[in-house]
Image: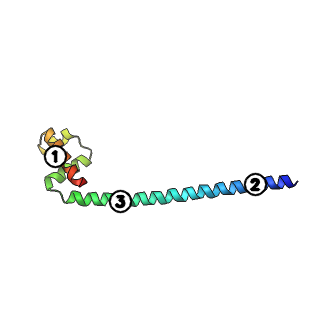
Amino acid sequence: MYRIALNVAVTQHRRASRRIQLASLSERMQLLSESTDQALQERLQWLRTRISRLKDGDRALVLLYLEDHSYEEIAEITGLSVSNVGTRLSRIKQRLRQ
């Protein structure tokens, strides 16, 4: 009888600790998600600010690129050659990284 009571107590303790671990994991995931969202928002704001400081032509290229237009489509829209679009976007990306 003592052994049965002990086994029941041990089982309940294990279940309770699993619930605590799951709750703790869930809370950590929530905090991580919130901090990731905040970090992402900060990076997006930083990028928007940097893009707004570009010259009009460069800003237009970046915005078209961010709208998932191909280099060919951007070239057609802007009247630039495809190679010029690629070169300019590459240089703009380098400036944005600095």
Which residue has dot 1 on it? Answer: 88
Q: Secondary structure at mark 2?
A: helix
Q: Nearer the viewer, residue 98 or 86?
A: 98
User: Mark 2 or mark 1, which has the lower sequence index?
Assistant: 2
Q: Nearer the viewer, residue 48 or 91?
A: 91
Residue type at mark 1?
Answer: Arg
Q: Nearer the viewer, mark 2 or mark 1?
A: 2
Residue type at mark 2?
Answer: Val
Expressed as whole percent of the image width and height from the top left, the position of residue 68 reads: 27, 44
Bin the neighbour count of mark 1 within 10 Å (Cα to Cα): few under 14, some 14-19, many 20 and up.
some
Expressed as whole percent of the image width and height from the top left, the position of residue 80 reads: 11, 42
**Gap between marks 2 and 1, in whole Å?**
67 Å
Which residue has dot 3 on it? Answer: 41
Expressed as whole percent of the image width and height from the top left, the position of residue 96 reads: 23, 54
Residue 73 lies in quadrant: top left
The residue sitting at 55% across, 56% down in the picture is: 26
Q: Secondary structure at mark 1?
A: helix
Q: Nearer the viewer, mark 3 or mark 2?
A: 2
Q: In screen coordinates, is 46 left or right of 9?
A: left
**Gap between marks 1 and 3, in whole Å?**
27 Å
Residue type at mark 3?
Answer: Gln
Q: In screen coordinates, is 68 left or right of 82?
A: right
**Gap between marks 3 and 2, in whole Å?**
46 Å
Which residue has dot 2 on it? Answer: 10
Q: Are marks 3 and 2 in contact (CB under 8 Å)?
A: no
Expressed as whole percent of the image width and height from the top left, the position of residue 75 reads: 15, 41
Bin the neighbour count of mark 2 within 10 Å (Cα to Cα): few under 14, some 14-19, many 20 and up.
few
